[in-house]
Image: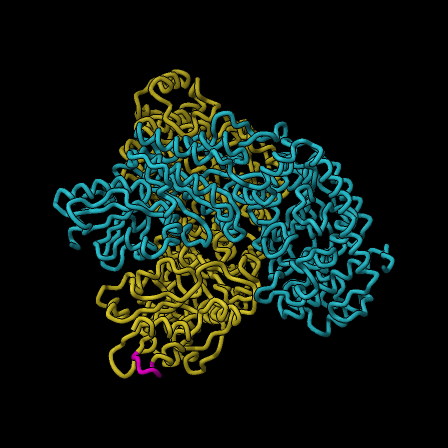
Chain colours: A yellow, B cyan
Amino acid sequence: MTTPTTDHTPLANALRALSMDAVEAAKSGHPGMPMGMADVATVLFRQFLKFDPKRPDWADRDRFVLSAGHGSMLLYSLLHLTGYEDFPLEQLKNFRQLGSRTAGHPEYGHGAGIETTTGPLGQGIATAVGMALGERMMNARFGDALVDHHTYVIAGDGDLMEGVSHEAIGLAGHLKLGKLIVLFDDNQISIDGPTKLAVTGDMLARFEAAGWETDEVDGHDPEAVAAAIARARTSPLPSLIACKTVIGYGAPNKKGTAGVHGSPLGADEIAAARKELNWPYPPFEIPEEIRATWTAIGAKGAAVRKAWEDRLAASGARAAFEALLSGALPAELSTAIAAHKKALSETAPAMATRVASQKALEVINPIVTATVGGSADLTGSNNTLTKGMEIVSPENYGGRYIHYGVREHGMAACMNGLALHGGFIPYGGTFLVFSDYSRPAIRLAALMGLRVVHVLTHDSIGLGEDGPTHQPVEHMAALRAIPNLLVFRPADAVETAECWELALQATSTPSALALTRQNLPTLRTEHTDENLSAKGAYVLREAEGGAARVTLLATGSEVEIAVAARDMLQADGVPTRVVSMPSWELFAQQDEAYRTATVDPATVRIAVEAACPLGWARWTGENGAFIGMEGFGASAPYKVLYEHFGITAENVADAARARL
Amino acid sequence: MTTPTTDHTPLANALRALSMDAVEAAKSGHPGMPMGMADVATVLFRQFLKFDPKRPDWADRDRFVLSAGHGSMLLYSLLHLTGYEDFPLEQLKNFRQLGSRTAGHPEYGHGAGIETTTGPLGQGIATAVGMALGERMMNARFGDALVDHHTYVIAGDGDLMEGVSHEAIGLAGHLKLGKLIVLFDDNQISIDGPTKLAVTGDMLARFEAAGWETDEVDGHDPEAVAAAIARARTSPLPSLIACKTVIGYGAPNKKGTAGVHGSPLGADEIAAARKELNWPYPPFEIPEEIRATWTAIGAKGAAVRKAWEDRLAASGARAAFEALLSGALPAELSTAIAAHKKALSETAPAMATRVASQKALEVINPIVTATVGGSADLTGSNNTLTKGMEIVSPENYGGRYIHYGVREHGMAACMNGLALHGGFIPYGGTFLVFSDYSRPAIRLAALMGLRVVHVLTHDSIGLGEDGPTHQPVEHMAALRAIPNLLVFRPADAVETAECWELALQATSTPSALALTRQNLPTLRTEHTDENLSAKGAYVLREAEGGAARVTLLATGSEVEIAVAARDMLQADGVPTRVVSMPSWELFAQQDEAYRTATVDPATVRIAVEAACPLGWARWTGENGAFIGMEGFGASAPYKVLYEHFGITAENVADAARARL
């Protein structure tokens, strides 16, 4: 084995060379950031980061988040050089090509070592807050011997301009996440040019105002960077280190300009950079001694990891630790949910589904100890807090409920981070209309396949007087449009319990529960252990007096209306079936036989939902009809609004009659 | 006439009484904030605000934005007492009832005096930044004699926790909007309880870091409040005044608690408050001398307004001023667009629609001088900057292009504020996928009916290597779901020019233009002056050899694919029509005759769009088919992706053949 070099610069230049060469080979990508932050990343990985490329799932590893995800080649270069199996040189050569693990932006799940998907700016740092919080919460449960790791973030100007960064750093400061360290690539350049075109504030003062410790260093001085990270690690507060860097460092003619941000350098500039960096090697070739040093950097964590495994084995907590991390649901959950449903069916309470959600959580939370609740300052409205849940605070990371503040976006990203960290099933509440605020993070959860649950109450004009700013109209459709997201809108307390069970069982899919503010009757008065919502839609009321001529489709609060319309049509002698559709996505996954047996195309199909029509034609066909909202809502008591907008049993029945 | 009182407290108590009584009558609403901020609002309206209730559209009035929109009764009480015609006592008695102007949250357009719709937190302050910027930009055009007004905002804890507030205050600080003054209702209470449950930062330091001047006062000391506002008015920087208040001030048992935030006080507490406030009058009754004083406050602006009108008349700029404010498009625009289209049809360039958008803007911007462009740090990618547009900066408010920074949400809200201010038609660019970030502000533009144009480039997997984080899949559907939003996806440079014209003509509807990164051929090679996109969908290629048996529906970059598929089907002898659908919304507005004549239900209908299928069944029917995306995209060159995801002419033709 070649003797490892101790010189910093060639190590950093290896990152620079791989990055510029891969971008050049792809004819597409972002060389500027990797070249600018190569020194900082080298110091971090070499001297501080606790990791073992042979065991990338080691629970107590430090987390490294490249928030400025466009600089993905920096991450891929690091993973390659330190020995992550998923990132051989071949992958780097196939940067940005179909099927490669080296996508344009880091994609969680593409290869071990990518801790989270980044690229949409601000998401990485906000997700990292959730990871860092997860570390403290696991630490509170298992102690320093088993859980004691840092979360490091590289963030750029763009990340910190995004609003979600404000929510995230506010939350991190409030929760005193001292093991969160953000390395700010302070290169003064954004895409449009110098950042001063759009920004003049004082970044350090801003973080200090949010309760962070701050520092400023020359990002190309490895000793200064190391000293700053060492200081930050001792701080009880989260830390920002502004690293003054030159974007595209090493590219003599383009460095320090916006031109080096998002385009290949070109052959001439790459040749010039090789000279400037004293890097005479061909593309993708790393001299042996430099490679050996990087390999050694990757190897140093193995002993630490083994020592940790020994501690885990000796701790007596191994089974509990691994059970929590596995994400498996306790076997008794289904039994408990079934018993809960039975009690509801028997007592048939009139209850808002947001309250029914809380009742379901009262059953779930004592059994599923991985759940972590919270709300964006609407706890009493979202009904997300259950008995005995303590509040998470710097004094009590052992709590299970998070007051996120009015930070819907930050909440959703934090939930993603908690899920990625492992050990937790996060759920968080806000009003359905404000899912718009958290949408970029919901999308990332769907893209990454994370089990997080969004509790979205006040789900229609049924919220009443707060008016159109608070009444979702387009949000069901907008959420249904997101791939790999389960959108649930239960019709009563029984369905609510079923939807919660499904959301928890969906280990690689986020869920959104749309829940009412207003009371609804219990429609499921005949108990069955079976989770009827699991098929997405099912016959709630069968037609009587012959084969169904009409099928009424509804979700949530409008199922009650469909049932009333059915009674009218049955009174007319028209056999009418009511199908409750708590989840379009699950219904769409059923085979065609079940789908047509449930929603029979030979019947007149009328859909009713207090929302916009987009998407319903798929279920009603062209000859069917939709009763719902055609525009924004209004401010009035909710029963007045249902009448005003014509979402009534009479109108549903009339629509069917007109088509018979 | 009764002699006006000079005493402050009864004036403020009138606001408190009206607010608590209206909430009580509605059995719903938020008394805490109006009661807490009544003193501050009284000082502002009495001593500073420049307004004339008889001419609420006076262009040089100060703007007052109640960002904490849940406290709407504070605004309605002020508008009522100062004499706004739209807000007689009857309206206050009908607070939160159907058809009243006094909705649960202030709704722009419900009554003159409501400057913007607020309620979704953070939107008010972010919109106000646009208003304040509009003031400076109009001032640069017409001078101090005609444009010299302040923008005042009342914001609460929730507003300032929202991420968009970070983007907004950053932009305001950068642009040195000295005439923007934010009165922060610093009552330390949010819905979940004390704000310290979720927030520990230093608000004043935060604003200072963003380039603001700050101050802190007792919000119940009118002299201190007045002194702080007076100081703020002299500052060249935007100002934050933290007003220490007691939420629900005057309600002796509930004040200072979260319980007073969002529920009626109840009869007992209202009785107690009447005693505490020394307010022995029945509900909705205002003693004459107090009413007279408030009336006088409302009347004092008339003389100022008249003097301004005289200045306008004498200025020589009146015609230009009024033309700009009218929002009318110059008559020559349509001629110029037609000439531009003709040139394109003749030269038939291959061109990305984002570039075509810039070409259209090169025609539009010299003619429509009200346009103000910008981008969230993607100027070169969004192609939003045209020749000769100067950059807006503190040194040059006369510019027409705004570097918004990486602040998509703040940009969208700022655009709303510019449109509300009057004098401007704002457009702003980002990637389509990041419309998720700005969605809450896009929604408000739709709800308010504002003419703003979102330039959303990189509109599908056609952006290629940046991968799924950057590839919109669900965004067309999500935008189409929003009521009163025109969503355009033009197929070539000619359609792009047409869609721009339609967006500008839509005076009470925001627009979103979805534009490609990749080149597209010019499909409209036969020129017509008529704007064919105006009907939303039209026959681009007619079937040959008989009546159409197949209709291919497509938007944007997939129209080219539909045209190629048509050629294949025609070669098979299947008469096939291609319908380009640049706007679903406009097509849905056409009469049924046009719709069925264009998209004939008797034909096999195949839709193709590189996006999720949601909503397409409305146009294809159940027997049709959709070729597009079923999940997230991938990172690869775009032609590879189209093949990989099967969005090809072959697949479109095959889908048609299978159904013939």
Q: Nearest the camera: A479 or A358?
A: A479
Q: Is residue A67 left or right of residue A540?
A: right
Q: Measuring from the top left, give residue B18's x and y in whole percent.
A: 72, 64
- Residue A397 can be seen in this image: yes
Q: Quadrant of residue A504?
A: bottom left
Please report the bounds of the magenta region as a residue range. Answer: A570-575
What residue lies at 36% left-to-right and 71% top-to-bottom? A655
**Total labels drawn:** 0
Task: Looking at this view, name the residue that lies furthest to the left.
Answer: B572
Q: Is residue B21 left or right of residue A361?
A: right
Q: Quadrant of residue A533?
A: bottom left
Q: Is residue B322 magenta?
A: no
Q: Measuring from the top left, give residue B620's x and y in whole percent.
A: 27, 55
In the rendered image, the vertical position of residue B115 relative to residue A603, given as above or below: above
Q: Measuring from the top left, give residue A568's x and y in whole percent.
A: 38, 80
What residue lies at 69% left-to-right and 32% top-to-bottom? B315
Q: Quadrant of residue B624?
A: bottom left
What residue lies at 50% left-to-right and 31% top-to-bottom? B367
Q: Nearest the camera: A327 or B353?
A: B353
Task: Looking at this view, name the residue that lies furthest to the right.
Answer: B3
- Residue A213 can be seen in this image: no
Q: Nearest the camera: B142 or B218?
A: B142
Quadrant into which the N terminus of chain A falls: top left
In the rendered image, the vertical position of residue A72 relative to residue A578, given as above or below: above
What residue lies at 45% left-to-right and 77% top-to-bottom? A521
In the rendered image, the vertical position of residue A339 relative to residue A147, given as above or below: below
Q: Is residue A484 left or right of residue A475?
A: left
Q: Measuring from the top left, give residue B406's x and y in whole percent.
A: 50, 37
Q: Magenta residues: mostly which secondary structure?
A: loop
Q: Is residue A505 left or right of residue B482?
A: left
